[in-house]
Amino acid sequence: MSIEIANESGVDVDTDAVLAVARHALDEMGVNPLAELSVLLVDIDYMTELNHRWMGGEGPTDVLAFPMDEGSVDHGPGESAPAGGEPALLGDIVLCPEVAAKQAATAGHAPADELHLLTVHGVLHLLGYDHAEPEEEREMFALQARLLASWRSTRNQ
């Protein structure tokens, strides 16, 4: 699994933990081990620009996911690797640590925990999950909680 991370946010972030939670989520979801993912941490101004340009939103958001090659994602052992053994390009997850820190304060947990949640959330979006409809939201958020809980349990051993 190739995961590239770039912290351009100006905020000190434990990028190793962000990488670890992303890798855990992808592994647990049975994604092809040749898959490639990019994680970018950005400041509020850049996230505001991306949110406006790509989502039509106002102001900054916490996470954006930009899927690249949904057709080649290996969702489990029943599917074969992409043709020619080429890696699946999952896409990009963009996180804003400053927004995550504000949300963490409101939720009563650490900013790092919020970034881990948002990373898993972004991974699930790249894998085709959504939360536009109530049933989709229940499924995605339950899966998100399960992945976070299993990742935390492996870290505490």
Image: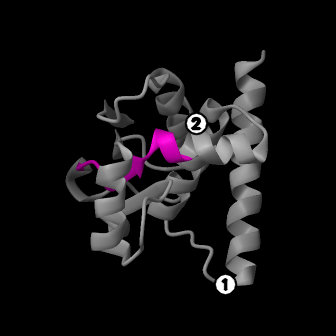
**Where does label 2 land, which residue?**
24
Q: Nearer the viewer, residue 77 or 108?
A: 108
Which residue does the image show at 67% across and 65% down from the upper left? 140
Q: Is residue 10 visible?
A: yes
**Amino acid residing under circle 2:** His
Q: In terms of secondary structure, where does tag 1 sit?
A: loop
* Left or right relative to 12: residue 37: left
Q: Nearer the viewer, residue 151 or 81?
A: 151
Quadrant assignment for the N terminus: top left
Q: Quadrant of residue 25?
A: top right
Q: Position of residue 14 (x, y in %)?
A: 49, 22
* Residue closest to the far top: 157
**Amino acid residing under circle 1:** Glu
Q: Position of residue 150 (x, y in %)?
A: 75, 37
Which residue does the image show at 43% across and 48% down from the upper left? 32
**Above or below, comparing residue 45 to residue 27 in the picture:** below
Badge 2: residue crowd in 10 Å (few <14, some 14–19, many ≥20) = some
Q: Position of residue 102 (x, y in %)?
A: 61, 44
Sequence-wise first label, 1 or 2: 2
**Above or below, comparing residue 27 to residue 80 in the picture:** above
**Where does label 1 land, which residue?**
133
* Left or right relative to 125: residue 47: left
Measure the C-alpha gap from mark 1 to mark 2. Answer: 26 Å
Residue range highlighted in magenta: 86-99
**Above or below, comparing residue 130 to residue 39 in the picture:** below
Q: Nearer the viewer, residue 138 or 69?
A: 138
Q: Quadrant of residue 42?
A: top left
Q: Quadrant of residue 157?
A: top right
Q: Position of residue 7 (x, y in %)?
A: 33, 31
Q: Nearer the viewer, residue 87 or 107?
A: 107
**Colour mode?**
one colour
